[in-house]
Image (cartoon, rainbow, N blue to C red):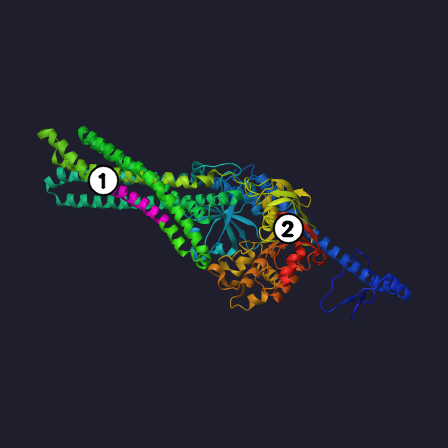
Amino acid sequence: MQAESDGPGLMPVTQESWVKLDSTTGVVLRSSAELGASRLLGAGLPEFHRLTLGAESIHRRLLVADDANLQMAQVSRRRHEKAQARTRLSTLVDARRPHGDGAPLGDALRIIGRHEGIAIRTPAFAGKEEVSLLDYCEASGVRARRVRLSEEDRWWLGDSGAMLAFRRADDQPVVLLPGGTGRYRVVDPVTGESAPAGARTADVLRDASVLHPGLDTGERSSMRALLRVGGAKARSEIVQVVAFGLSAGLLALAPAVAVDLLIAKVIPAGDPVALIQFTAVLAGLAFVAALSHILRGTALMRLEGRLAARIGAAVWDRLLRLRSEFFRRFNAGDLAARSLVFQDVRDHVAGVAADALLSTLFALPALGLLFYYDAALGWAGTCLGLAALGVTTAFCIRQIKPQRRYLETSRRLLGDLQQFMNGIAKLRTTCAEDSAFAAWARRYREHKEAEIRLSVLNERLVAFSAAVPALGSAALFAVVAAQGAGGLATEDFLAVHTAAMVLFMAIVMLGNSARSLAFVKPACEQLAPILASTPGSAPRPGARVKLQGDILLDRVSFGYSEIGSMVLQELSIHARPGEFVAIVGESGAGKSTVFRLALGLEQPWSGAVYYDGRDLASLDVNAVRRQIGMVPQGAPLQNGTILDNIIGVSNDLTTEDAWRAAHQAVVDEDIRAMPMGLHTTVGENSATFSGGQGQRIRIAGALVRNPRLLFLDEPTSWLDTQTQARTMRGLEESASTRLVIAHRLSTIRMANRIYMLKAGQVVQVGGFDELLAADGPFRDLARRQLA
């Protein structure tokens, strides 16, 4: 080999040698026989020796630097082990210190777990390699959500649950625990020391994460399990709701007792001072009652917020773990309606529990006061209350069926509307607007019929509830009239009447709780398919692997339905580390299904998918997917910014990583030309960007983590020829193994191998020029494109 311009002269190379050139240097290949005839065969050895010895010198200096870095790491590790040893010794006298694997991150998470009722498990590979927050979360079956610690929000004065944060100075984890006085405390997991959080704390902490427990993985679940996850460690809020509700219920009887005392003693005595004192006491009790209601409402809001966060996270965690076949059973709108119904269930369950509890706390003291004054009136109030509650319950039972019908029609209507909106262009092209309107009108009529039926029953229940206090008063008057002249005194009757009104209002409140239950049962039925389905992505401890880039689909057969035809039949595709392998074929040949199998989204009926010689079924699928960059066909950009679309929500990626990936995807110049650069907002439907820009931003997002494998499904379909060529050259800079699905054959000219698929089978394999020269479906496809 000889350089064309200034630079090294003759250089001997072998079949195993590799050469990297800049854009201005070219080479000329000369055979050994040619150089021998010219008597130049030995001329390249001095240059080879010079470069080799120079590289050896650089290598030795790098080894010295590596030794220095290793010594520094050993010193740091010894200091850390010393601190851990002291911490373990301190646990002999301080039970509050964490017990675990000795890692500060693990100790911090266990503190959070004890506070939140979450079992934190240590990953099986801990001690062998570095363990991240994501590793702990996957081993424990929980999710972590990033939160912003802003001084303007004054987060340290609230209660958002225990949080994990990191110090800016040394990147060490700390725990933020809400205190009983309403102020967070910062706990060091290594030393166990804690300090109150304040405005300065936000400046020294980098970011924070909140853990959300999920449902049990690998098995079916139920609504009871979902509520158990939501209500874990909520005892203090429940105790506060009960305590303040009981005090409010007792104080609600103050007017009844006050009326008795006022008429029996204060007014007959004609003492204005006593009347003023009596008024002041009532005003004080009213203030205490208002305070009790405020505190009860605050505790109830905290309880509802806790339920909202935990139940919402558990439902979405469940959805993300379900198998692909589950999602084929529902359209997008139907599934969205089922997924979001948990919000209504959550609110109704919290409201039902609170209203039922409070109405009971109000009713029992009032009923006791009735029996205290007169047993006959007490029994009359009891019978009337039970009768009213029975009628209310009957109304609620009658509401269950129309409520179920209402939710079903609402779900179907939403599903149809979403499909119509997504396909509005096709509807106009095919002149099918009238058919779409007819289908919508049919669903809408069913929905309104169910809504009207439900509204009629609800209005009847409201009317009956409004009549309960008046009926109760009439019943009391009837009982007193039946007692004759020897009945209650006037002041006692007024007290009894006031207490009875409290009782009847509590019964009405209890009836409203029963009405909410009529919604909860049908709503839970909507969630049942999600909770009852078996998850398909449970973590497999010990099955982690660091991919090298080799992937093999070995004699894979697969179909989406057991009664339908197979999509893939005995298909084999192999890509070695660093290779560029293309998959082409007509629409419906099974190209995208290959990616679904390779990602573990579908399970092959026969055959297997191997990564570096290991069956994907024996690996942690999530760990494998994190080492793969994927660009699906037609995927839109996400709402947020360009930076969000490239690096996502990762804490370990920076804007420099985003610019590097954007440069590889040949979209960095487009981003720099935008007024806000990487922080340019991505709106609904990505209308700000052209189709080609959106594709290259998605490619940058796939490249940002330097994945070992890249799966690209039609990555350049929106690009012009020149931009496509630049983008493919940028992808060649990556050391990743590239699997590319393409219809445009100019995209895959440089592929090491091309697999031609037809009806789910590989019918041709070879290089671009090789397949183009051979008679077959690839050449037919190329002729159609060239024509």
Give how far across and how far down residue 380 sits, in percent: 19, 31
Above or below, 90 relative to 42: above
Q: Nearer the viewer, residue 360 or 580?
A: 580
Give how far across and how far down residue 733 sits, in percent: 67, 60
**Residue type beneath disc 1:** Phe
Q: Nearer the viewer, residue 175 or 349?
A: 349
Q: Residue at x 13, y 32 (%)?
A: 480
Q: Residues within 10 Å of mark 1 (few under 14, many from 20)?
A: some
Would residue 591 appear left or right of 261 to someone viewing this image? right
Which residue lies most toward the left here? Answer: 485
Q: Which tag, 1 or 2, sits closer to the chain's start?
A: 1
Q: Which residues are magenta?
A: 442-466
Would residue 782 appear left or right of 96 to someone viewing this image? right
User: Viewer-nearest of labels 1 and 2?
Assistant: 2
On the image, numbered disc 2 is attached to which residue? 757
Q: Residue 660 lies in magenta, yes or no?
A: no
Quarter of the image containing the C terminus?
A: bottom right
Q: CA distance from mark 1 to mark 2?
A: 70 Å
Can residue 538 be seen in this snapshot? Answer: yes
Tag 2 secondary structure: strand
**Residue type beneath disc 2:** Leu
Tag 1 secondary structure: helix
On the image, numbered disc 1 is attached to which residue? 464
Quarter of the image containing the N terminus?
A: bottom right
**Is the magenta region chiefly helix, strand or loop?**
helix
